Amino acid sequence: MAGDFILAPHPLFDIVGQDLEIVVPVSPWEAALGAKVTVPTLKESILLTIPPGSQAGQRLRVKGKGLVSKKQTGDLYAVLENRDAAETG
């Protein structure tokens, strides 16, 4: 309708206050052994270090990569998700 303002969810990020959350699929060996994976932010892609011994559901904080306001800048939280070995090719 004319004049309606419709917001759609972002395809990559969930917004939680000033913070952003993104699901990052990792293979079992990346979680167990540690790895570096490319993760998008609102401005650019960054290289995120997955520490050895990480587990699905773990949240990794990237300070200052969330939403920006006049008073503060939020953080980006990368939520690790298991990626099946069959998906890795």
Image (cartoon, rainbow, N blue to C red):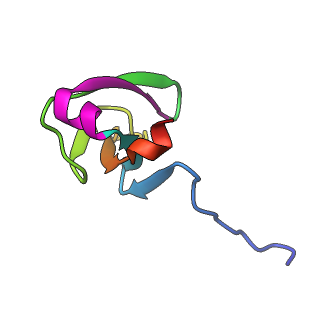
Whether the magenta-drawn stretch holds residue 7 is answered as: no
Identify the residue at image location x=42%, y=23%.
46
Identify the residue at image location x=36%, y=49%.
18
Whether the magenta-drawn stretch holds residue 34 is answered as: yes
Examine the rendered structure and indicate whether residue 80 appears above or below residue 16.
above
* Image position, residue 58 (x, y; %): 21, 48
* Image position, residue 40 (x, y; %): 49, 32
* Image position, residue 57 (x, y; %): 24, 54
Identify the residue at image location x=31%, y=44%.
77
Closer to the camera in the image, 74 or 37: 37
Identify the residue at image location x=18%, y=27%.
33
Region in magenta: 28-41
State the image quarter where residue 76 is shown. top left
Regarding residue 62, the answer to whether it shows in the image is no
Q: Residue furthest bottom?
A: 1
Examine the rendered structure and indicate whether residue 85 appears above or below residue 64.
below
Examine the rendered structure and indicate whether residue 51 appears above or below residue 11.
above
Closer to the camera in the image, 89 or 66: 89
Examine the rendered structure and indicate whether residue 84 appears above or below residue 70.
below
Check the picture and name the quadrant holding the N terminus.
bottom right
* Image position, residue 68 (x, y; %): 43, 39
How many marks overall?
0
Closer to the camera in the image, 59 or 66: 59
Q: Is residue 31 left or right of residue 19?
A: left
Regarding residue 30, the answer to whether it shows in the image is yes
Q: Residue furthest right?
A: 2
Q: Residue furthest left?
A: 53
